[in-house]
Image (cartoon, rainbow, N blue to C red):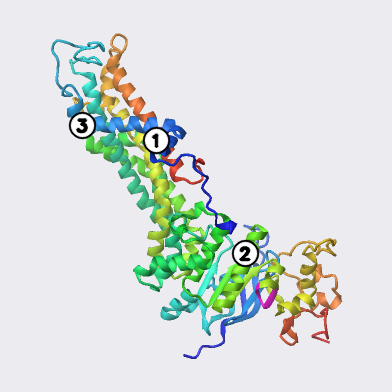
Amino acid sequence: MSTPPELFRLLDVEKAYDVGRKGGLFASGPRRRLAALDGVRLSLKAGESVAIVGESGSGKTTLLRVLLGLTSPTDGRALYREKDITLLQGDDRDRFCREVAMIYQDARGSLNPRMSILDLVAEPLDHHGLCKPSERRDRVAALLSRVGLPPEMMERYTSALSGGQVRRVAIARALASAPAVLVADEAVSGLDVSTQAQLLKLLRDLQREMGVSMLFITHDLGVAAYLCERIAVMYLGRIVETGLTKDVLSAPAHPYTRALLNAAPKFFEPIAEPLGGEIPSPIDLPPGCRFAGRCPEARDDCRARDPELVAGAPNRAFACLHPLIGEPAFA
Amino acid sequence: MADVALSSPPRAAHSRGAMAWAYVRGHVWFVIAAVVVGAYVFAAAFAPFVAPFAPTEQDMMSFMAPPAWGAHLLGTDSFGQDLLSRTIYGARYALLIGLGAVAIGAGGGLVIGLAAGLIGGRVEWALMRLVDSLLALPSLIMAIAFISILGQGVDKVVLAVGVALIGPFSRTVRGDVLQVKAQPFVEAARLMGVGTLAIVWRHIIPNVIFPLAVQATIRVSYAILVSSGLSFIGIGVTPPTPDWGLMIAEGRSFVSFAPWIAGVPGAALAVLLIALSVVGDGVREQFDPKLRKEG
């Protein structure tokens, strides 16, 4: 069977929500739309890992829900192995469910508190019929040891485990169906630095040993740099810059990427020019570049013309009229 | 690695007996209440062997005898019936009615609450308005209304009190279903491709059945109280059934000179209700990890 190299492909995906008329209940103005995703183009090849970074409200979570088929795009197409994710049926759907595994930010909430660790980790095995009942315990023990948990833990419930242990259980469960893609939403945030480091190392080992692709949603550029060779920076429902992580983070082209880099505290250095204000409301956006209002480099044309995401260098694309590197995309 | 260390605190006592003793010391009132409830259940189950007399046997030689060491330890009533024996038999009716009514209320509440919470929309609206109308009247008034339709008798009392309890049970089940439905683990199961029925069976019902069980233990005492109230006002269980509410009603006229006639069944009722409440709280503490005490 020939499989296309791309697992996920998003083609100009738009997800807009109707938010009613301006002025509330008795208003008569035009209906307003909130574009949580506005023309997102993204692909994930087998074995590749991509980080999606951006502030809260940039559309990361909506992107995730589209990728998982939990919500359908209002425009554009979201494809898994060249098939529309929300239209998957029968064997294709089973395959999608088996091959795409999710690691939740709220790992504890993603695990049923009334099920033992054994049943939780075995649920994907049982559901997809991946092992004989006699092998069940051994398979779960192997998965637990793969994520660094002792097999005695099988009989326990998540309420008895620490935050780090719960994340490991969530990872073991995600690995149970031998997925092609791990989708992780802030999978290591809110933990002790030591626990976070252990989990990051575990995820990188899994990546290398199992060749599993990873789509890692995070707001931590350090995590993105450690785990993912490619990065996509999102702002207000758009990808504003994408490329190899090391290129993008060492020489950002988009002022927003540079602002994110500068906002991360470094040892013994003051935080350089923090980005002013907050991400604006995605309702009724002004014309022009959506970052212009907060951009230190904004010029007059930025407020008039909306830049598209175009290739500006090999393996590199950004949506900026006056990028910080190389030749401007538009003269 | 440090992460793997188990979180349970080191135990001072290792033998089974010592652990049991440590549990008793940590939950004195729960254990006492559980023993009391156990004694009532035992007395009710083995009433013919525990009670010195038959519940309706009349002693023509002693009417309204006060409690005294002798044949009638807790005295007799105005018909010469032994109060201790009647109170022991009365525990049968109290527990039977309490458990039966709660079973009906919890069962009906589970079905209505699940249907409302899972289906949503118009079905939910209609079911919850029905529940609102059940809740609009106090349970006692509602039970009186049902009795007047169904007629008197133990089975009718169970049914009437049980139906009156469906309202509050439905409410809590629906609330729990809505809360559990929004949990990430339900979405995670859906992503795994688990079907709706399996999600309901494996993920939603187990998470609503425990709070329901806890509520049920607490409501048993309420059901007993309502049924005694029905008997007390004379529309529940019919005489000469040894029902506590009925016995209290009979003793009411003599309360100034023979207070034991109403006092013995009254005390039996009060002690059982308090014990059941304490047991209910203890059960809630055990099943709700958030309330569980350390150690």
Comparing labels 3 and 2, the label whose residue is closer to the camera: 2
- Specify whether residue B263 is painted magenta: no
Question: Residue at the location (84% across, 61% down)?
Answer: A268
Residue B213 as seen in the image, left or right of residue A1: left
**As displayed, is residue A290 above or below residue B82?**
below
Q: Position of residue A323 (x, y in %)?
A: 81, 79
A331 with respect to A50 (left or right): right
Horizontally, residue A104 falls left or right of residue B172, namely right
Separation of residues labelled 1 and 2 (CA atoms)? 45 Å
Q: Do labels 3 and 2 touch, CB within 8 Å?
A: no
How many neighbours does mark 3 have within 10 angstroms: few (below 14), some (14-19), or many (20 or more)? some
The image shows residue A248 at horizontal and vertical percentages of 75, 77
| Camera-side residue of A315 and B87 | A315
Q: In which quadrant of the rendered view does residue A95 lie?
A: bottom left
- The three-letter amino acid code for the residue at tag 2 is Gln
- Camera-side residue: A143 or A233? A143
Residue B185, image x, y percentages: 49, 61
Q: Chain of mark 1?
A: B
Residue A169 placement (x, y as % from top left): 51, 62
Question: Few, some or many C-alpha atoms within 10 Å of disc 1 (few <14, some 14-19, many ≥20)?
Answer: many
Q: Which residues are magenta?
A: A227-233
Q: Given this view, does label 1 or label 2 mark the residue nearer the observer? A: 2
Q: Is residue B152 visible?
A: no
Query: Which part of the image, by quadrant, shows the C terminus of chain A?
Result: bottom right
Badge 2 is on which residue? A198
Which subunit holds the residue at mark 2?
Answer: A
Relative placement, left or right, of B181 versus B269 is: right
Residue for badge 3: B46
* Quadrant of the rendered image containing residue A274: bottom right
Q: Which residue is mark 1?
A: B279
Q: Secondary structure at mark 1?
A: helix
